[in-house]
Amino acid sequence: MGHGSQDHSRGSGHVDSHSHDHSHDHGHGHDHSRVRGKRLWVVITMTTVIFLAEVVGGIVSGSLALLADAGHMLSDAGGLIVAAFAMIIGSRPATRRSTWGFRRAEVLAAAVNAGAVCVIAVWIAVSAFRRMGEGVEVETGMMLVVAVVGLVANVISALILNGGQGESLNMRGAYLHVLADLLGSVAVIVAALVIAVTGWTWVDPAASLLIALLILPRSWALLRTAGRVLMEQVPVSVDATGLYDEVLDLPGVRHLHDLHIWSVDGETAVASVHVVTDEPADEEDRCGILDRVQEAFRDHGISHTTVQVEERGHEGHEDAVCG
């Protein structure tokens, strides 16, 4: 039986090169974390200010839509703070007890944020249905002014976070919060204008219901994505069946088992696999098999793969879990 990995298959020269690349990426990642952190704290400050303005404006104007949006802003402020602290924790280096580091903290934050938005959306919808037939008088002037200010702030916040939402699930969750607020501000503005022109007060709770319908699908999708990561399922971007067949067709490979593909942070896929050869192979043959297997995984977007090369018969001593 033999064991191998990408680092061990090429000699000390490759190990030195790999170490250099790793340290460069690590530093680069810290730079990205600092930039994302600054973006988040700016948005947190703006969100908190707008929340206070919407609470006062909602009480004075009697607008449920404005109060509903304020409630969502409060959820956002808390969610963004969770995201910011998760980013701080996630940027900590790996330790002997946490060999993958703490990047999953950001996935947990994304799940919490997505779940919070789902709850808020349901609460807004229930409140809107209860308010539909009440015909409460609404002060549209105050409602409109506060909503416009909130819209401007949310547009700025969305632009600040837009550049980083593709970098992690955590940033995607933060961006989702802000985007939902932006849509909510638009709905409140439209409701205020319609009520001012027509006097139809039912438009106010209808706008609240629209806010809920707009934000619920995106938050549910993010919650499902975070759940897949936490359950260590195969990332949706990876074709596990196609990868299995491709590795099985490689020269020197007769069988493979214990194929596992997962993600630690929701962005980067990692894998491990046991590859079975027909006959005892010398070191050069093993290196060739390792190279071909690693290349197949890289072609499927997986750059971190642990490969064990073993001879036929050895797999009988293990629990086979084929992909």
Image (cartoon, rainbow, N blue to C red):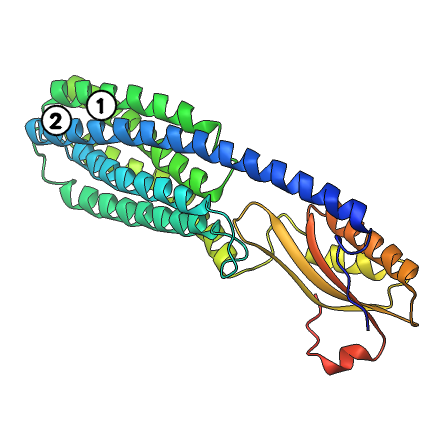
> In the image, is 178 to the left or to the right of 126?
right
Q: Looking at the image, is 70 positioned above or below residue 241?
A: above
Residue at image x 77%, y 82%? 316
Q: What is the quadrant of residue 201 in the picture?
A: top left
* Residue 162 point in image, percent of width and height: 45, 28
Tell me how far mark 2 sits from mark 1, CA to CA. Answer: 9 Å
Q: What is the quadrant of residue 200 in the picture?
A: top left
Quadrant showing the N terminus: bottom right
Q: At label 2, which amino acid type do we have?
A: Gly
> In the image, is 303 to the left or to the right of 264?
right
Q: Which residue is mark 2?
A: 57
* Residue 235 point in image, percent of width and height: 59, 52
Nearer to us in this view, 237 or 279: 279
Q: Which mark is residue 147?
A: 1
> In the image, is 102 to the left or to the right of 278?
left
Residue at image x 92%, y 65%? 282
- Is residue 209 visible in the rendered structure shown here? no
Binning the other alpha carbons within 10 Å of mark 2 as few (below 14), some (14 to 19) or many (20 upward) gives many
Q: What SS does tag 2 mark?
A: helix
Is the residue under label 1 in contact with that under label 2 (CB below 8 Å)?
Answer: yes
Q: Residue furthest bottom?
A: 317
> In the image, is 19 to the left or to the right of 106?
right
